[in-house]
Every structure is written in structure tokens, then in C-alpha cells.
């Protein structure tokens, strides 16, 4: 292993309005190594990265860089209104003889590059029209194409499904072979062990461990992250889901023939009380759209939604009133209200219920907020902290709390564990389990197959906006699902390398 | 190869929407012109067309700068005052020759724009309020220069500078050609240069743009400087055309400029917009004004009602087309 | 009209009596300019108004032109520039385009209408400007100017002020809109007028933008900080009326404790004189119709037209306000 | 969670404090300046004058603050004031109550129309309300036939001239409305929904909030408040003056709101800040007039003060 450091950080401390995000952190990245950066939500991973790249200036400490850095940030950081190719080449566009941007060449090269990442979308379309996962791939392509010495990836796979994860890991391998150093942040253990040479564990803003990864048993790594003993953790399996649930007989939610051209066409889903139904499919297969159609956020060309046999008016308000809640996939643009406090974000949807004649009651709000902050272990300095200041995972928990305090009958969860750490993930999964046991009907959308297989009692598989099949009981195996998801896609059969 | 092989239905719909978005204002303009032509015989006369184009030219120059500003997600309320100031400076400067008359307003107005840009980019103050302050400032400066408005500087009729505003090519005034050239250059800068890409990125998603290494601050400073300079240029051209530095012009002009940019399909929230759209927007506003005049008998109080209604129809129409 | 026949003197004279005595430079005749002859009857006459008819002066001005056109059997084309100079230029061009053979223009501003005059010249259309004198050349760029002498108005206001205050007092001036040459002239005239009266000092001059409520607001501030103000000169009636309201609210008796003099001649202000809470108003005569059409007719006949035709402005004070109330607009 | 009281955090806290309270400090400084350097400043009459003049601006600014809270802006407030002014003489025959009610109805309708354009048709607020800014004043002039109308109804005029316990009625009304709006923002679901819609409209929609109703409500409120301001200003003027009533009020109101610390980017409404923003701008105007500065210098000083006030209160990155 080469020992020449490309990044060297010593004693870095970074504080935000009284919150210490990093405290005396030492960190070294050597040329050509793939370095895992792990830790709980809010441990300071993203902050460390922003210090490394110079976005944040540390309060104290020394940052040494010895090479060009290129970064994929945690939230997709591209410009949605600009075209895909413009995003890919922003800042280094090919020029014509007159020094003007050569758009034809830019588009052609972009299409060529993106094909290598399995994206065949029109590169002249606005980036925002792509699915989140596709956008993440564009960000990846952009970072890689910048020919840097260091590539930093902050949770690059959190919005990718298995096939794209493979593509991405392939890219990492390629970069690794080319001698480029990589910092890789992820909450997914499998990935880390597959590709990383070394690991740094952050806890509460401190570096609690740095060293080779292969020597470190998985369980010990988790224990380092959480600061809990190995024994305590050993109880859990891959996911925190329990056995199947006892569902009621009559479906509480029936969505029949949902059609919203061109995204989904005749999708039907029904869920019984106490049942967790998983929605599986490739990126862009229309899972998010199905959930949005059910909640009434997508204009429908056809189809109806029934709750307990009664048709629900097609609007978010109507659905909410009927007892449906949805945790949106993209928490940044569709979830949090950044300038409001944690408390205000949590009670937002339930506020009318917590008020009398439109006058709010602070005491009732505080009670409910306290309950959920404790129950979901949301890491905040106070409920009055602005939600925008929380780490990604904690924001996700705030959103979950928002929906749980509306006491819904039906909960639609679009990627509920995206970007949250192992500890929190287990909690969320256990929570889903618990909620189902309490009689809630849950629709679970996840790009992680394990999560779907373990968590769902039944799987509805979508392909190109239509239902491609339903799997239950014995059929709930990896092979069956992959076969159903990607019936036509040949190269999928042998992509099962990640477990 | 320009595209991926197989555009999906989604992409095709998106493309179609884009065409309509772009042409919403154009469709409205074509309709307006066609109807006016039929209803008012004098509308289509060559004299009327020349005058329309000339009146539009001054606004186009200002709106061009405003387009850039708005695409970065900003706004520039100072252009009306800066325009008037530019005219006064040009008229004052004309006694020292052509070059002073032209350069002085550009420099001073550019400086005001630069200060706007610096304040906005470096201090995170809202563009609306910063440029509102410079609206007051520029008007104040104008009053200082003109002895509280008591002095109006005249441009000697034989000065070469007058030719800039009054000269014509087959009846069409020079300002029309100047505006046209500026638009072509502006369009190229916006779409075909790195600076143009930065303008889009800044307005589209500022935080992301920062992370992508776009020089946000520099881009903002540049667009406001540009807007100030162009407003100054429009003022100078107007002074040349009017042969004097009239002090009372430009009041409320910022709202006209914003309206035409938005009518032209540029998103007020930033990140999207075209120069051509702005030109079409100017066309629409000027045709509406012209048509109101053609009606002739309209009570002066009704004129603003009609303008308001027209404005409303155009934006609603555009909005509906966009769906 | 009935009002016209009431007039007697040059200065105190009624509305539409022209005093052509102040004409400057040589006259202007059709023969020397080469304009075609146009018979007023049946002729298309264009009138370009500068601002909305939202104040009494503009209303009376437009009405006077409309009435006179109807009386003479001329067809009147009308435009309103809505306070936009560029629009006034287009307006004038479009009037010519629509076939106006004679033009009456109420300029928005003294400067800046040159392109419009050039267009009229090119089409051989004579232009009479009213109410506000422009800096272009009479007889060449336009035919003649009919209107008041604003500096003179200011001077007369000063005379009335001296009379009302007895030559001593502290005066607040409510200025018109900044940058407007009416403001400039009326200020100059007034200051010249009181220059020889050392007892009168100007303690404040602030703009009320020709607007009643702004005049009121400014007066409220001034009377608080300078409670010893004894006179107000308002550059139009609207601000004067606003000042009266402000003075009353501050516990002063306008017209007595604080003398008020203004310029315009609106019904409201003249009524206030009659009621005793205002001291004097210098008229700014808006009834240009008869004079303008007379001038055009004379020009058509080939007579020589003076470069400037000063319309006579009446004045109102406590002695005559009640009788002349009907003459106010 | 680690909390440390380092020098850096203390400085941060101090700037934060100034950022939150800058407008109050500015008002204090300006008051002090006037007490020291302006003749006859410390009189009851003078303070009454300042409050009376500020009252209509404050009423409009309250509505504007709500609109800005939803990430909108209402350029039509001045035109709505003019419309209210134009309506009054038409109904004064049926008594002042009727006239005021009709003016308010017009204000609410105009505002709701704006709200409809913004919420349902999806037009950007600046442009949607610009249409009414242009057309509304024209409409007012058409209603009034372009003329200023002298008003003589003593009961209606009393609204502008009378006081209760030494406090002018218009000031009382403005103060009361400020309290109501403050309660609305801090104590009601509607208030929370306003900032939620302004903070992230998409998320608010997905959270099942009645986004359209909130938007229409906020614009209707702004229209209603503008109409109230129009009524008060008219009664104080003693005349209905649709041509000049509320001219450029939109800019004064927006300035006051922003100077008071409400960001134009929405998601936050500061009611007390708005009150002080209005007072600050009123004091600035009064100071400039009382010191008899020429218009040119006065405008430049106003510009500088706006910049300084907003600079202090700006959100730091
Ligand atoms: N801009 C900010 N203002 C205030 N606090 C912040 C800011 N950015 C981060 N923090 C705080 O710093 C701590 C570390 O956050 P960071 O985003 O680095 O966590 P992370 O390890 O990336 O978590 P995750 O896995 O959830 O993304 C958190 O407590 C967070 O609330
Ligand atoms: N705002 C949008 N405008 C245009 N097309 C969109 C938009 N949002 C999504 N799409 C397209 O609709 C299709 C389905 O959407 P989406 O990708 O959200 O489905 P999904 O199955 O939920 O995938 P994901 O794994 O990202 O949740 C995709 O092809 C995507 O490109
Ligand atoms: Mg992170
Ligand atoms: Mg999805």
C-alpha cells in the first residue's frame, strides 16, 4: 500500500452555533486507498468532508491537501433546471474555435459518458426530469470525469437500487485501479467491506478509530459507531424486522387502476390493517408515482382510492383526512420546512388536531414532540433548533415523527431508511414492525432488497409503470424478486454479488 | 450523435412542454399583432412599425440586463432611476464630445450596478431591497447633478452624439440596431459562454452551484454591473434621441422591465430564461400600448385598466399554455 | 362664454382672454413656413394630453379643448401620455399617422419632445404647445406656445404673501415635484418676489410632490418642528389644501395664524378663501381651447402668430373669492 | 450534544442578537439623534404626528409581512388603497358604516383575486399583483370619474381626526391590528401554515396543508388591510383622492417589512419587527423633513439607512 498522503488533517474542530460537529479530528488519506468514513447520523461525516473540500473553514486545526479533489455530496447537488449535459460539463465545457461553448459536442460527449453509467435519457432535457437515482449517477459521472486525485463520495448509493449500486461500485473499482484515492461514506456495511481498504469511525464529532477495514469484524465496527458493546448489538440480524404480521381480513386501503400518464398505468394495490406491503421495482418504475397517486399529489387520468371501502377525494387533504400519510422520498425538497424548528416540523400535519378553533396549544405540542424525539432518538440540541441544522438522518426521523403524530391508518413510506445510519435504520425498521403490529397498514418502498424481503409481508413488483407481479410467502426470495423486477433485463441475473 | 437513442414518452412530453413554454409569449404576440392589424388599419403602417421598434429598443436594452439578473434569481429595481441618471450624464457629458457623452453614463451607471452586485453577493442582502435603495440613491444623485431638477442639460443639435439616437437606416432608428446587436451578443453570452452557464446555475440552485465550483459572487456582481451599464446605455441613447437629459423619465420603468422579462418566460425564481423571450415580451407590451392608442377614444382612466387587463390576459394565457 | 365677458383688467382678467403682448422675437406666418392651409371646420385636430385627467387642472384643460373643437366643427383626436415622455412622443407620431393636420400638445416636460416635433415638421403639421413652454425653437420646431408664465405666477404669489403677512413672517414653501420645471419656475418667481422684503424669511422648503396628502404630511412635520411658521406658500392648490388640514389638526387657524397662498385656482381652494381659512390663490388658467383654436385659425388665414402667447391668469383673495367662486375650476 | 462558550460562539451570539434586534437599536439611535438635534422633538404633538402618519403604512405592512411570509409579494396594495378611497364617496350617502364596509369588501375581493391568480392559476406573485397595480388605480379613477371628491360626513371624518383617551383612532386601530396579526402568527394554525407554505411549498402540500386556502387567505388579508389603510388615510385627508392615494405604498410597505427583519425569501414573519420597521422609516422621513434637507440628499440618505438596517439584520450564510 502506498503511503504518500494526499489529504492530511490534524486537530480539526468545527462548531455550528454552539453545536460541536467536529472535535479535534485527525484524518489521513493515502494515495490510491479507498477509505471508508462511517458513523451515526450527525456524527460529523458530511461536515468533515466539507472541511476537506474547503466549503467550511474549521475553527481550529490544520487541513493539508495534496491534489485535486472532486466530490459527490450527500444530497444531489446539481442544477435541476439546467440540462443533463450542462450539469455534467458545467465549468469545463468543450469550446468551438471562437471560444464559445460547443453544444453539439457537449451533448454528444455527455450521452456517450452517461451510457457508461447505464443512463440513456435525453441529455438535453432538464436534469430535474430524471429520477433521483439517475441524478445521482450524473453527479457521479461529473465527479469522476473531473480527473481528480481524490474522489469523495458522501452516501452515493443511498438513492440507488441494486443494479445501479453495481454500476457505481464498478466505477469505484476502476478509479481504484487508476490509483485515485477515494473517501467513501455509506451506512451500508456490505458495500464498505466490498470496496474499502481502510476505515475511519466518527462518533459525536470525534475520530474514535482509524485502521484497515478487513481486520475489523463487522460487529465491532457497528459497536464503535454506536458506542455500545458488541453483545448488545449481537442480538440484531441484518435488518431489525421481526416475523410476519397478523393482518386483518378486509383491506383498509384499496387503490384500483391508478393511471397517470405517462408515469403509471393501471396500478392496483391493496393493504390490510397490520400488513406491510412492499413496492419493488427498478428506478423509474413508478413506485414513487404510485405512492403519490394514492396520497392525491399526482393528477390522475383514472383509478380510485378507497379507504375502508369508501372512496377518498383525490387530494392530499382528502387523503390525509381519510387517514393516509406519506413520507416523501426527497426530504430536502418535499419533506422538511427548513426554516421552521424541529417542533414545528413535527407537529405540522397534526396541528389542526392539536388546536382548538384554530388556536394552537403549546403544551400539547411540546408533549407530543417530546414523546417522538425520545422514541425515535432524534438528535437535537433542543426542539426549537432549526430543522435545517440537523444531519440528514435526523431530518428523516423528524419527518417520520411528523407522520406518526397524525395517527394515520395507512402509512406510505418512500425510502424511509434512505441515508440513515445502522442504529437509526434498525430503529426505523423496528418501528415499522411495531406500527404494523398495532394495526397500521404500511406501504414500503425501498431500493434495498433485503429491507423489502425482511420487512414486507407481500411484495408488489412494478415495471414500467404497471404491476409486473405480486409475491407472497415462499416467493419472497431474492431470486424471485429479481426475476420479476427485471424480467427483460438480461444482465441482471448474475448481479447478485453484494450479499 | 446528439441524443440518446430512445427518448421516452416522458422526455417527449417534456420537450413539447418546453416548446410551448418558450412560445407562449410568441403565440400571444402573433395573435395580438394579427388582430390589431385587422382591426386597426393604421397599426400596420410602416411609420407605426418604425416607431414601435424604436420605442421598444430602449426598453429592450434595459430588459436585457434585467433578464440576466432575473435568471440568477435576483431583481434590479434601480434600472428606472439609473436610466434617467444615464440620460442626464450623457447630456451633461455631450459638451465635452461624443466619447464623454457615451462613456460617462456607462461608467457611472456600471459603478452603481457594481455596488448593487457587491452588496448582494458579499453580504447576502436581498436584491429587492438593495436595488430599491439604489433606486433612491440614483434619483438623489440625478437631482444633485441637476440642481434639484432645475437644470436640464441640452445636447447641441449638431453634436455627433445626437446622431446615435436620431440617425436612421431606411427610417429605422440606430437604437433599434444597437438593441438588436446587444440582444444577439447577450443571447450568445447567455447560452454559449461559461459565464452564461454560471448565470443559469446561480439562479437554478445556488447551494448546488457553490458545491459545483461556480463562482457565485463573481457571477452576481457581473450581472448587476451589466444591468446598471445597460440601463445607463439606454438612458444615454434616450438622451441622444430626445436631445436633452430629461430628468423626469424612467419612473416606474423597472416594473415594465420586470414585466416584459417575466412575460417572456423567464422564471422570476431564477434558473431559466431566454433573451428572445424578453424581446417578445417587449413586443407585447409595446403592441398593447400602441393598440390602446389606436382605440383613440379611450378615456385616459380606462387606459390603465385596459393595460392591466391585457397584462393579466397575457400572463394567464402563457400559464395555461405552459400546462 | 359667460366668464369671458366678465373680464376687465389684464391681470385680474377672466379666463380665456389672451394677452399677446409678451410675444418674443418675430412672429410666425404660414407664408414663410410653407405649411399648407387647413380649414378648421371639418379638420382633423390632434390633442396630446400629458397626464391623466385626475386633477382639476387637467380635466378643465382637456374639456376646454374638446368643447372648442366641437364648437368649431373640428374632429378631435385625443391621446394621453400617462406621464410617460416616450409615450407622448409615440402619441404625437400616432396622431400624425392617424391623419391629424393640426396639433395641440400639452407637453409633459419642457425638454425631450424634439423627435415628435421633428415628425410633425416632416409631415407639415403645425403644433401649438399649451400650458408648458418647451425648449425647442418656436416657428421652426413648433408654431407657438400658449400658456402662463410660471415665474410670474410665483412673483404674484409673493405679492399676495407680502400683502397677507404685512411683510413679516416665517414662510414654509411646499415645493412641487422635484425635477419638474413648473416647480423650478414657481420657486424662482416667489423667491425673487420676496427678495425685497427682508421681513419674510423662508424657514423650510420641502417637496409635497403636487399631492394633497403629501403636502399635508410635510406640513404636519414642519409645524411640529417650527411652530413659529406664520405663512405657507404652496406651489399648487392641492398641497395648500393639504396644509390647511394639517394646520387645523395642529390647532392653528389657517388663514389667520398662518397665512396660506398657492397657485392654481381650483374650486376647493377658492372656497377656502371665501370661508376665511386661506389667503390667496394665483390662477393658472387651464382654458386653452378658445385661444388655441383662434391661433390655429389665424395661422391658417395667413396672419402672423407671436412666438409666445401668454394666457391671462386671474387671482383670488379674500376680497373677490366669494364673487368669483364660479370662475374657479 | 456539546455546548461550548468559546469566544467564537460568543461573537456569533452577539451578531445573532444584533441581527434579531437591529431594527430596535436603529429606532433607538434615531430617536436619540432627534432628541439631541431636532427642535421641538420631545412633544406629545410631535409623537402623535409620527404615529398618525405611520398608521396606514403599518396596516399595509402587516398584510405585506404575511404575504412575504408565504414567499410572495403584493404590489397592488397602493392601488387597493386607491380603490377603497374611490368607493367611499359612492356609499357615504348610506352612512359611514356602509361606506367602510363596501371599501373593505372591495379590498378583500381584490386581494382574493390576487390570491386566486397566485394559488390556482400559478402566476408568480410579482406579476399577478402587478396587473392589479396597473389596472387597479385605473379602475379607482374610473369609479371616481377621475376626480378628487371632498368629503363632508362628520362621522367619517372623525375617524381621521378624533382621539380616544388622547390616542388618535387610526393609531389605535393600527395597534390593535398589529396585535391581532401577531396573535394570528404565533398562536394559530393559520399562522404556522403561512410560514410553512413560505418555507417549502411542496412539502406543505404533501403534508396535507390547505396551501391554496392559505395563499388566497393571505392575499385577501393583505387586500383587506390595504383597504383599511385606504379608509383611514381618506378620512384623514378629508377627501377621496384615487389618483394619489397610496402611490408607491407597495415599496414603502415592503421596505418596512424587510427592514424589520422579515426575509423576502419567505418562511418567517416578524410582526414586532415590522412595526419597528415602519416606525424607523417614518422617523427617517420626519428627520429629513425637519432638518429641511433638499430632496436629492434626503433620497440618498434614505438609501443609505435602508442598506444599513438590512445589512445588520441580514441572514448570514
Ligand atoms: N450548517 C449547520 N448548522 C448547524 N449545525 C450543523 C450544520 N451542519 C451540520 N450541523 C450539525 O453538525 C453535526 C454533524 O452533521 P453532519 O451532517 O456532518 O452529520 P453526518 O455524519 O453527515 O450525518 P448523516 O449520516 O445523517 O448524514 C450534526 O449535529 C448537525 O446537526
Ligand atoms: N418531475 C418529473 N418530471 C418529469 N419526469 C419525471 C419527474 N419525476 C419523475 N419523472 C420520471 O418518471 C419516471 C418514474 O419516476 P420515479 O423515478 O420517481 O419512480 P420510482 O420507481 O419511484 O423510482 P425511485 O427509485 O427514484 O423512487 C422516471 O422515468 C422519471 O424520470
Ligand atoms: Mg451526512
Ligand atoms: Mg422513487
Image (cartoon, rainbow, N blue to C red):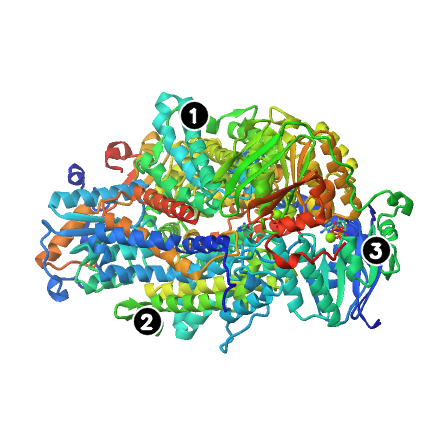
Do labels 2 and 3 touch, CB within 8 Å?
A: no
Q: Residue at x 50, y 78 (%)?
A: A97
Instruction: Decide: is A76 above or below C208.
Output: below
Q: Return the residue at label 3.
A: A201
- The number of numbered discs placed on residues in the rendered structure image is 3
x%, y% of residue C161? 37, 43
Secondary structure type for disc 3: strand
Which residue is nearer to you in this view: D132 or C210? D132
- Chain of the residue under the numbered disc 1 shown in the image: D
x%, y% of residue B268? 49, 52
Q: Return the residue at label 2.
A: B163
Q: Which mark is residue D101?
A: 1
Is residue C130 among what the camera can see?
Answer: no
Which residue is nearer to you in this view: A314 or C313? A314
Answer left or right for A362 relative to C141.
right
Is residue A148 among what the camera can see?
Answer: yes
- Chain of the residue under the numbered disc 3 shown in the image: A
Which residue is nearer to you in this view: C151 or C136? C136
Amino acid at each position: 500500500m502506498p503511503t504518500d498522503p494526499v489529504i492530511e488533517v490534524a486537530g480539526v474542530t468545527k462548531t455550528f452555533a454552539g453545536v460541536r460537529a467536529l472535535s479535534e479530528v485527525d484524518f489521513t488519506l493515502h494515495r490510491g486507498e479507498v477509505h471508508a468514513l462511517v458513523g451515526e447520523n450527525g456524527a460529523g461525516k458530511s461536515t468533515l468532508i466539507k472541511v476537506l473540500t474547503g466549503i467550511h473553514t474549521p475553527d481550529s486545526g490544520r487541513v493539508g491537501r495534496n491534489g485535486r479533489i472532486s466530490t459527490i455530496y450527500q444530497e444531489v447537488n446539481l442544477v435541476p433546471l439546467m440540462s443533463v449535459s450542462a450539469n455534467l460539463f458545467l465549468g469545463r465545457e468543450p469550446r468551438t474555435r471562437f471560444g464559445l461553448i460547443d453544444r453539439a459536442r457537449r451533448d454528444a460527449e455527455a450521452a456517450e459518458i452517461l451510457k457508461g453509467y447505464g443512463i440513456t435519457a435525453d441529455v438535453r432535457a432538464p436534469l430535474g426530469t430524471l429520477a433521483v437515482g439517475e441524478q445521482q449517477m450524473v453527479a457521479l459521472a461529473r465527479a469522476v470525469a473531473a480527473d481528480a486525485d481524490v474522489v469523495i463520495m458522501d452516501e452515493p448509493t443511498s438513492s440507488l437500487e441494486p443494479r445501479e449500486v453495481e454500476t457505481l461500485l464498478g466505477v469505484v473499482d476502476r478509479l481504484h485501479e487508476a490509483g485515485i484515492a477515494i473517501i467513501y461514506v455509506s451506512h451500508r456495511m456490505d458495500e464498505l467491506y466490498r470496496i474499502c481498504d481502510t476505515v475511519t469511525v466518527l462518533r459525536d464529532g470525534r475520530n474514535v478509530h482509524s485502521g484497515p477495514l478487513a481486520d475489523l469484524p463487522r460487529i465491532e465496527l457497528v459497536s464503535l459507531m454506536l458506542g455500545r458493546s458488541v453483545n448488545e448489538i449481537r442480538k440484531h440480524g441484518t435488518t431489525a424486522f421481526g416475523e410476519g404480521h397478523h393482518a386483518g381480513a378486509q383491506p383498509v386501503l384499496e387503490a384500483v387502476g391508478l393511471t397517470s400518464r405517462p408515469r403509471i398505468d393501471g396500478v392496483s394495490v391493496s393493504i390490510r390493517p397490520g400488513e406491510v406491503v412492499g413496492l419493488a421495482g427498478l428506478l423509474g418504475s413508478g413506485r414513487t408515482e404510485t405512492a403519490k397517486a394514492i396520497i392525491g399529489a399526482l393528477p390522475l387520468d383514472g383509478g380510485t382510492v378507497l379507504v375502508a371501502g369508501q372512496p377518498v377525494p383525490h387530494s392530499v387533504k382528502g387523503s390525509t383526512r381519510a387517514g393516509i400519510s406519506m413520507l416523501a422520498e426527497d426530504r430536502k425538497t418535499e419533506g422538511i420546512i427548513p426554516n421552521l424548528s424541529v417542533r414545528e416540523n413535527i407537529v405540522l400535519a397534526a396541528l389542526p388536531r392539536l388546536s382548538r378553533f384554530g388556536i394552537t396549544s403549546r403544551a400539547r405540542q411540546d408533549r407530543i414532540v417530546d414523546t417522538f424525539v425520545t422514541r425515535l432518538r432524534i438528535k437535537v440540541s433542543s426542539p426549537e433548533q432549526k430543522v435545517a441544522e440537523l444531519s440528514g438522518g435526523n431530518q428523516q426521523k423528524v419527518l417520520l415523527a411528523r407522520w406518526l403524530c397524525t395517527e394515520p391508518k395507512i402509512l406510505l413510506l418512500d425510502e424511509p431508511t434512505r441515508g440513515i445510519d445502522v442504529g437509526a435504520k434498525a430503529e426505523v425498521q423496528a418501528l415499522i414492525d411495531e406500527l404494523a403490529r398495532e394495526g397500521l397498514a404500511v406501504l414500503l418502498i425501498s431500493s434495498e432488497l433485503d429491507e423489502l424481503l425482511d420487512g414486507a409481508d407481500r411484495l408488489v413488483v412494478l415495471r414500467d409503470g404497471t404491476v409486473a407481479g405480486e409475491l407472497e410467502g415462499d416467493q419472497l426470495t431474492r431470486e424471485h424478486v429479481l426475476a420479476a423486477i427485471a424480467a427483460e433485463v438480461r444482465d441482471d441475473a448474475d448481479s447478485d454479488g453484494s450479499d | 450523435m446528439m441524443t440518446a437513442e430512445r427518448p421516452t414518452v416522458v422526455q417527449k412530453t417534456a420537450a413539447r412542454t418546453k416548446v410551448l413554454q418558450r412560445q407562449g409569449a410568441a403565440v400571444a404576440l402573433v395573435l395580438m399583432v394579427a388582430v390589431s392589424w385587422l382591426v386597426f388599419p393604421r397599426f400596420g403602417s410602416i411609420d407605426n412599425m418604425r416607431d414601435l421598434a424604436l420605442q421598444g429598443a430602449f426598453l429592450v436594452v434595459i430588459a436585457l440586463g434585467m433578464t440576466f439578473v432575473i435568471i440568477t434569481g435576483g431583481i434590479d429595481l434601480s434600472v428606472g432611476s439609473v436610466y434617467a441618471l444615464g440620460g442626464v450624464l450623457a447630456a451633461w457629458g455631450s459638451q465635452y464630445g461624443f466619447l464623454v457623452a457615451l462613456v460617462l453614463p456607462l461608467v457611472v451607471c456600471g459603478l452603481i450596478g457594481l455596488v448593487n452586485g457587491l452588496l448582494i453577493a458579499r453580504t447576502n442582502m436581498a436584491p429587492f431591497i438593495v436595488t430599491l435603495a439604489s433606486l433612491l440613491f440614483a434619483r438623489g444623485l440625478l437631482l444633485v447633478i441637476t440642481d434639484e431638477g432645475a437644470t436640464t442639460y441640452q445636447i447641441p443639435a449638431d453634436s455627433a452624439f445626437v446622431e446615435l439616437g436620431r440617425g436612421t437606416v431606411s427610417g429605422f432608428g440606430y437604437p433599434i440596431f444597437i438593441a438588436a446587436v446587444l440582444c444577439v451578443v447577450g443571447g450568445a453570452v447567455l447560452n454559449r459562454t461559461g459565464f452564461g452557464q454560471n448565470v443559469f446555475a446561480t439562479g437554478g440552485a445556488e447551494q448546488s452551484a457553490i458545491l459545483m465550483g461556480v463562482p457565485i459572487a463573481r457571477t452576481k456582481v457581473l450581472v448587476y454591473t451589466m444591468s446598471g451599464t445597460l440601463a445607463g446605455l439606454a438612458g444615454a441613447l434616450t438622451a441622444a434621441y430626445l436631445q436633452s437629459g430629461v430628468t423626469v423619465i424612467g419612473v416606474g420603468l423597472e416594473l415594465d422591465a420586470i414585466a416584459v422579462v417575466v412575460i417572456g418566460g423567464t422564471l422570476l425564481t431564477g434558473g431559466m430564461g431566454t433573451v428572445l423571450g424578453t424581446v417578445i415580451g417587449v413586443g407585447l407590451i409595446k403592441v398593447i400600448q400602441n393598440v390602446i392608442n389606436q382605440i383613440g377614444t379611450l378615456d385616459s382612466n380606462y387606459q390603465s385598466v385596459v393595460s392591466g387587463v391585457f397584462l393579466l390576459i397575457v400572463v394567464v394565457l402563457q400559464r395555461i399554455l405552459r400546462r | 362664454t359667460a366668464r369671458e365677458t366678465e373680464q376687465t383688467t389684464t391681470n385680474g382678467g377672466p379666463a380665456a382672454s389672451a394677452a399677446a403682448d409678451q410675444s418674443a422675437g418675430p412672429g410666425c406666418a404660414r407664408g414663410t413656413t410653407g405649411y399648407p392651409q387647413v380649414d378648421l371646420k371639418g379638420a382633423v385636430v390632434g390633442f396630446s394630453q400629458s397626464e391623466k385627467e385626475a386633477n382639476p387642472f387637467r380635466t378643465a384643460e382637456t374639456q376646454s379643448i374638446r368643447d372648442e373643437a366641437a364648437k368649431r366643427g373640428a374632429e378631435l383626436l385625443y391621446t394621453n401620455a400617462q406621464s410617460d415622455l416616450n409615450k407622448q412622443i409615440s402619441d404625437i407620431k400616432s396622431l400624425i399617422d392617424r391623419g391629424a393636420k393640426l396639433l395641440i400638445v400639452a407637453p409633459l416636460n419642457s425638454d425631450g419632445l424634439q423627435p415628435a416635433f421633428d415628425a410633425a415638421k416632416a409631415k407639415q403639421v403645425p403644433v401649438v404647445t399649451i400650458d408648458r413652454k418647451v425648449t425647442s425653437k418656436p416657428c421652426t420646431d413648433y408654431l407657438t406656445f400658449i400658456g402662463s408664465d410660471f415665474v410670474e405666477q410665483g412673483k404674484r404669489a409673493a405679492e399676495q404673501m407680502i400683502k397677507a403677512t404685512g411683510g413679516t413672517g416665517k414662510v414654509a414653501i411646499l415645493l412641487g415635484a422635484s425635477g419638474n420645471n413648473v416647480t423650478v419656475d414657481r420657486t424662482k418667481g416667489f423667491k425673487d418676489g420676496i427678495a425685497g422684503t427682508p421681513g419674510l424669511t423662508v424657514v423650510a422648503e420641502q417637496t409635497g410632490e403636487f399631492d394633497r396628502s403629501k403636502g399635508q404630511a410635510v406640513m404636519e412635520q414642519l409645524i411640529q418642528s417650527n411652530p413659529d411658521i406664520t405663512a405657507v406658500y404652496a406651489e399648487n392648490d392641492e398641497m395648500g389644501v393639504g396644509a390647511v388640514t394639517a394646520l387645523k389638526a395642529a390647532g392653528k387657524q389657517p388663514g389667520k395664524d398662518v397665512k396660506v397662498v398657492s397657485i392654481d385656482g381650483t374650486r376647493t381652494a377658492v372656497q377656502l378663501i371665501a370661508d376665511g381659512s386661506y389667503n390667496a390663490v394665483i390662477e393658472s388658467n387651464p382654458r386653452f381651447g378658445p385661444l388655441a383654436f383662434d391661433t390655429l385659425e389665424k395661422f391658417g388665414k395667413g396672419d402672423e402668430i407671436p412666438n409666445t402667447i401668454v394666457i391671462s391668469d386671474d387671482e383670488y383673495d379674500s376680497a373677490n373669492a366669494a364673487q368669483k367662486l364660479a370662475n374657479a375650476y | 450534544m456539546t455546548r461550548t462558550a468559546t469566544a467564537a460562539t460568543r461573537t456569533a451570539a452577539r451578531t445573532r442578537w444584533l441581527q434579531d434586534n437591529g431594527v430596535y437599536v436603529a429606532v433607538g439611535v434615531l430617536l436619540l439623534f432627534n432628541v439631541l438635534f431636532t427642535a421641538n422633538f420631545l412633544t406629545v404633538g410631535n409623537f402623535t404626528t409620527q404615529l398618525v402618519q405611520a398608521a396606514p403604512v403599518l396596516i399595509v405592512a402587516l398584510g405585506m409581512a404575511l404575504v412575504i411570509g408565504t414567499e410572495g409579494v403584493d404590489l397592488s396594495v397602493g392601488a387597493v388603497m386607491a380603490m377603497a378611497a374611490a368607493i367611499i364617496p359612492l356609499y357615504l350617502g348610506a352612512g359611514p358604516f356602509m361606506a367602510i364596509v363596501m371599501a373593505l369588501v372591495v379590498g378583500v375581493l381584490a386581494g382574493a383575486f390576487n390570491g386566486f391568480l397566485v394559488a390556482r392559476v400559478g402566476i408568480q406573485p410579482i406579476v399577478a399583483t402587478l396587473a392589479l397595480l396597473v389596472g387597479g388605480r385605473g379602475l379607482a379613477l374610473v369609479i371616481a370619474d377621475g376626480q378628487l371628491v371632498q368629503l363632508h360626513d362628520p362621522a367619517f371624518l372623525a375617524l381621521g381626526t378624533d382621539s380616544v383617551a388622547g390616542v388618535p383612532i387610526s393609531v389605535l386601530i393600527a395597534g390593535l391590528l398589529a396585535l391581532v396579526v401577531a396573535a394570528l402568527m404565533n398562536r394559530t394554525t393559520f399562522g404556522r401554515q403561512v410560514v410553512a407554505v413560505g418555507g417549502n411549498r411542496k412539502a406543505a402540500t404533501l403534508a396535507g396543508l390547505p396551501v391554496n386556502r392559505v395563499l388566497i387567505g393571505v392575499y385577501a388579508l393583505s387586500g383587506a388591510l390595504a383597504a383599511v389603510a385606504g379608509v383611514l388615510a381618506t378620512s384623514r385627508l378629508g377627501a377621496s383622492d384615487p389618483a394619489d392615494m397610496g402611490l408607491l405604498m407597495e415599496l414603502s410597505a415592503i421596505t418596512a417589512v424587510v427592514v424589520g427583519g422579515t426575509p423576502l425569501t419567505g418562511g418567517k414573519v416578524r410582526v414586532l419587527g415590522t412595526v419597528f420597521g415602519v416606525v424607523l422609516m417614518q422617523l427617517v422621513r420626519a428627520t429629513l423633513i425637519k432638518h429641511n434637507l433638499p430632496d436629492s440628499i434626503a433620497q440618498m440618505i434614505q438609501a443609505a439607512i435602508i442598506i444599513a438596517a438590512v445589512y445588520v439584520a441580514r441572514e448570514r450564510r
